[in-house]
Image: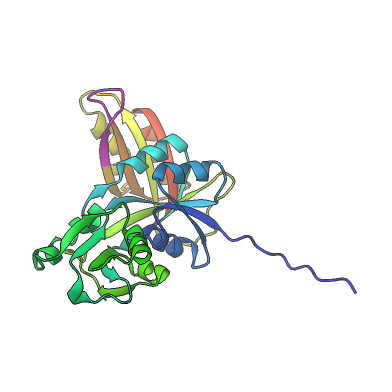
Amino acid sequence: MGRKHQSIEKPVRAAFQGERGAFSEEAAKLLLGPNVEVVPCPSFQLVFERLAAGEVDHAVVPIENTLHGSIHENYDHLLNFHLPIIGEVNLRIVHNLIAAPEMTYAKVRSVYSHPVALNQCLRFFADRPLIQREIHYDTAGSVKMLMETRQPAAAAIASSLAAQFYGAKILKRSIEDDRRNFTRFFLLAGPGHSAPPTVAKEWKTSIAFTIRNVPGALFRAMSAFALRDISLTKIESRPLRGKPWEYLFYVDFLGRTDNPASQRALDHLQEFTDDFHLLGSYPKSA
């Protein structure tokens, strides 16, 4: 009798910046499922390089935070690497006080984490003057370091996923100042990879463009959307590198590129732009 051959699907591989247990890994699992094979990278630059080289199928990168604004480095990488956005997720950032299993809350005298995480927990430190803040390169990395060194009287601030991954203990949950702290992550596709079939109620499209520095130029550019009742969800300007006092505009709008109204709006917009980039069209996050 002939043997039946079962097709074995390769796991989807996704790169992110940071150590295992980072918030970016949590976002990757939400976007690609719990079985995604994650590939941690020390820098955003390396995340994009590995995706462009085909070493991974996808990448998950943070693009903006509701408290700290846009991650401009990743906007620059989107333009430089031309890797399409195919998804997004808005992740609530919950900061937890984490320590080795033998540690107790009363013994904590120093807390390690990324400076952004430390600054998002200022009320916790103000109420506990005996506890010192210590800067570390990464939230999840601070948990990894504590579990390796077992520093006395030390804890870290990171995600619950980091505590779970490194076998640490959560001493106090949700110590962030603002519970409305969200980070928006983009899902990017590598060469030869596309978005899986998706049924979504709403879609977003992200673009970037430059316009001539003449009176009314931005008004006329934005009229391409207003005339067609297309809602803009984001508009941001960035200085244009190498051209002082000229700007690059990033815009997100509701709609997908194969929608007739969106197509007409983009055609109209490009009548006024010097440079235009379609960054991606993707299902809108809840």
Residue in the picture at 88% in, 71% down: 2
Question: Quarter of the image holding residue 122?
Answer: bottom left
The answer to which of 35 and 70 lies nearer the viewer is 35
**Residue at the limit of the structure toward the right, as seen here:** 1
Its colouring scheme is: rainbow
When the figure is inspected, residue 139 is found, relative to residue 230, above or below; the finding is: below
Residue 132 belongs to magenta span:
no
| Residue 237 percent coordinates (x, y) | 26, 37
Where the C terminus falls, by quadrant? bottom left
Question: Quarter of the image holding residue 127?
Answer: bottom left
Regarding residue 234, the answer to whether it shows in the image is yes
| Residue 121 percent coordinates (x, y) | 18, 62
Residue 240 belongs to magenta span:
yes
The answer to which of 34 and 221 lies nearer the viewer is 34
Q: Count the marks: how many?
A: 0
| Residue 145 percent coordinates (x, y) | 35, 60
The answer to which of 144 and 265 lies nearer the viewer is 144
Lateral position of residue 42 relative to residue 114, left or right = right
Residue in the picture at 39% in, 47% down: 205
| Residue 12 percent coordinates (x, y) | 56, 58
Region rendered in magenta = 236-247
When the figure is inspected, residue 48 is found, relative to residue 120, above or below; the finding is: above
Regarding residue 95, the answer to whether it shows in the image is no
When the figure is inspected, residue 262 is found, relative to residue 215, above or below; the finding is: below
Question: Quarter of the image holding residue 178?
Answer: bottom left
The answer to which of 286 and 175 lies nearer the viewer is 175
Residue in the picture at 35% in, 72% down: 168
Where the N terminus falls, by quadrant? bottom right
